[in-house]
Amino acid sequence: MATKTIARPSTPSGESASRVTVLTAPSRWPLLLLVVAILLSAGSIVGLLRLQPDARVDLLIDPNASAFKDQALFADAFGADPVVVMARPGPGASLITPDHIVGLSHLEGKLHQAAGVKKVYGPGTLVNTLAISTTTVLLNVCAQEGKSAETSARQQAVAAGKSQAQQDQAGQQAFQQAVSACAQRYAKAFPSLGVPAVNSPTFIQGVLLEPDGQKVRPFWTSSSSDLPELKDLRFTASGSPALTLSVADSVFNALRFLVPLALVAVLIVAMLALGVSTLLTIAVAALGALWTAGVAGFLGLPVTPATLVVLPVVLGLATDYFIQSVNRVMETPGTPKERVSVAARRILPSTGLAAVATAAGMLAFVLSGIPLVRQFGLFMALGVAMAYLANYLVGLPLLLFLARMIPSVLNATNVRAAAGRRIASIATLAPAAAIAIVVVGLAGWAALPAIKIETDPTQLVPAQDSALAQAEQVRKEVGLAGEIDLVVEGRDAASTDAVKWLDEASRRIAAQSGGDLKAVESLPIFLAGFNQGTLPDASRTTLIFDRIPSYFTGAVYDNQRGLALSIFGLTHVTSVERDRSLVSSLRTVGDPPAGLRAFPAGLAVVADAALSELQGDQLKLTLLAIALILLVLLIGYRRVTPAILAVLPTVVAAGAATGLLFVVGSVLNQRSSPITILLGGVVVAFATEFGVLWLARYRSERAGGIDPADAARVASVRVGPAVAASALALAAGFAVLALSSVPMVRDFGLWSAFDLLLATAAVLVLLPPLARRWYA
């Protein structure tokens, strides 16, 4: 067996004059590295200010999918999911007053100019539009009648031989009489409307109230205002945009306490494991998180419920890399410069290989079609790089200065020695028993496709969320909690056949929904409303579109894009699984007439597409993450056996955790949050580092001529405590996420912390016997 002498920590006097390399820079140029860190921190502060919370619905759907293109077409024509605002007057006050309608009209006009607003439908705009349209129509009709009367009177005056002055007088008098008679005739025909003006009480009530004068016609509008006419109104905002904004705010606000709490947690773990020298963890971990956030800000990566988990985890990861450096310095004799130099040469390559493998595993998620998952993978890979860089630029240079000032602080602690002996004692498992555990753990992966995903919106937003409470309040008042739309597209989407098909399909969908869907508005309903309750023929349809303002027709018909719409209201908040069946009923309602295409639209369709893609991604992305990690290890080791051994314990642990997640969900009837089902790949990516570190020490001892059993024992004694401390620091970074008010973030943090500890135990228990047996 070939052996070689291990390089001793003492450095020859001539080494100080050798060229500076990446591995020697922390001990040779520590001040320069710290200056680079300061410059990077200054730039990161600028990038940090660019970070924005984001919980847009389209983060959940592949922009290249046909469903997304349909949603974009629908949104361009009719707007996306509406913001619904309910206006309520004070006790005993009336909502429908001239001042309120004038104020609402002004408010709605301002909102129409706001960025991101497609259309505004509200009582103020409705009354104003009808007043203008009615006045215009009446003026045109009465003017035509007046002109006809004037012409007839002039002709009669000419026939009677009257002078020009008498002809003009007769014509003017006839014109005024005809216009007056016309106005009186229309006033008698519509006595309840009064004068068509936005501040006319009679006209307002005639437009907004049902014939009995009691029930208010429901209209959806937007936002609140400080207009004086509306000072006594209370506004309640709701709708999908309001809910997603609430989640985004919760995510961003959570960072204010999660990041400091995570920093305290990892500091406590580090100090308990390796003593007061790890106080430097504060600087290393904090800068790692700052750089991650700053670079993410420059790259335009948003803070979402998925990327929120990254910053606390980066604190744990930076602490992890720093702990490995401290551990190596503690066991290295010599001068401060020699100790840091040897530690850097020994630990940076192994932690570097682990970091590249971790980042590669996280980059697997970038291949997901769902933007939310892609951003999570990018943010996490960036965090891995910044955590490693923080240890290199700040951790090792600060250790050098600390060793020069207080050398005793970096002496090995009794806790570390005792932990090493305890860890070595649990690493004596027989290879046959280790193989049995491996088989059981790998079998747990079979449960991955069977894990149920939580899709109930009420379970995915923070508990006691005000936006959810407002949504329920609006639902109780108007009887609707959201909408699903059926869209017909074609060159003649308003043809008689198209309208008839849309009417029949809409009735069939509502009847088959079990009460979950209620027909709210549609092109057939709109047209029938102007044709005595029956669908009009082609000529009548054309007349309606010519006479009715586009403000109204645009709600259900877009002539430019050839789109007709049928809107269904959700009578209560439904789960995504129920939405899936409702969306399916819209897709399978039947084929429209030739030349037309029908498709569903709305948030429910987006959620359905996201759920389908997420379920398809869970196995594909997890396997891809493991494959990329294994590929990096194969490149690093240039041998198959160590690469497989480094990743195998974590794959086993992740499989066991997956099986346990399925069992817990089945027994307790619980569902996993959408991002939790990607947990397997995340845990394998992070925990593989521990296998790499243990194998690095094991290979080093074997290279020194020590037999496999002793090499495994020494590796467990020397590296085991640092691995355990690193795992606890990482787990602490994940565990603080359990304090988030966002359920999906909370569940991800809890399960990640548990799985990391399980994976660490698997490395320390399974890797020694497996290495003794297959890597001797």
Image (tube, rainbow, N blue to C red):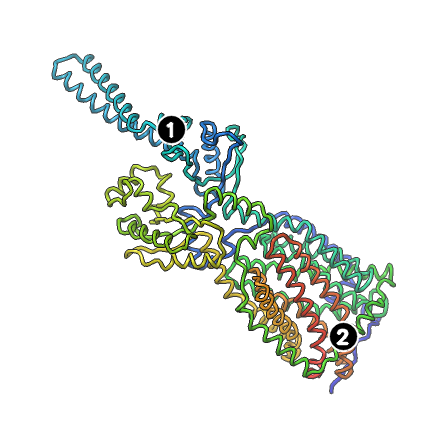
Query: Image quadrant of residue 359?
Result: bottom right
The residue that mark 1 highlights is 203
Q: Is residue 652 above or below residue 744?
A: below
Q: Which corner quadrant holds the C terminus? A: bottom right
Q: Amino acid at mark 2?
A: Ser
Specify whether residue 353 is in view.
no
Q: Is residue 44 left or right of residue 558?
A: right
Q: Tell me how far mark 2 sits from mark 1, CA to CA.
A: 86 Å
* Among the two numbered marks 2 and 1 on one chain, the one whose residue lies closer to the N terminus: 1
Q: In the rendering, at what x and y percent does residue 13 appear?
A: 84, 70
Q: In the rendering, at what x and y percent does residue 763 appear?
A: 69, 73
Q: Is residue 715 above or below residue 214?
A: below
Q: Cβ–Cβ below 8 Å for labels 2 and 1?
A: no
The residue at the point 70 percent across, 63 percent down is 730
Q: Amino acid at mark 1?
A: Phe
Query: Image quadrant of residue 735?
Result: bottom right
From the image, state whether disc 2 or disc 1 is nearer to you: 1
The residue that mark 2 highlights is 716
Q: In the rendering, at what x and y percent does residue 37 appear?
A: 72, 55
Q: Is residue 192 left or right of residue 232?
A: left
Q: Is residue 337 left or right of residue 250?
A: right
Nearest the eye: 488 or 664: 664
Query: Image quadrant of residue 183?
Result: top left
Q: Which corner quadrant holds the N terminus? A: bottom right
Q: Secondary structure at mark 1?
A: helix
Specify whether residue 613 is in view.
yes
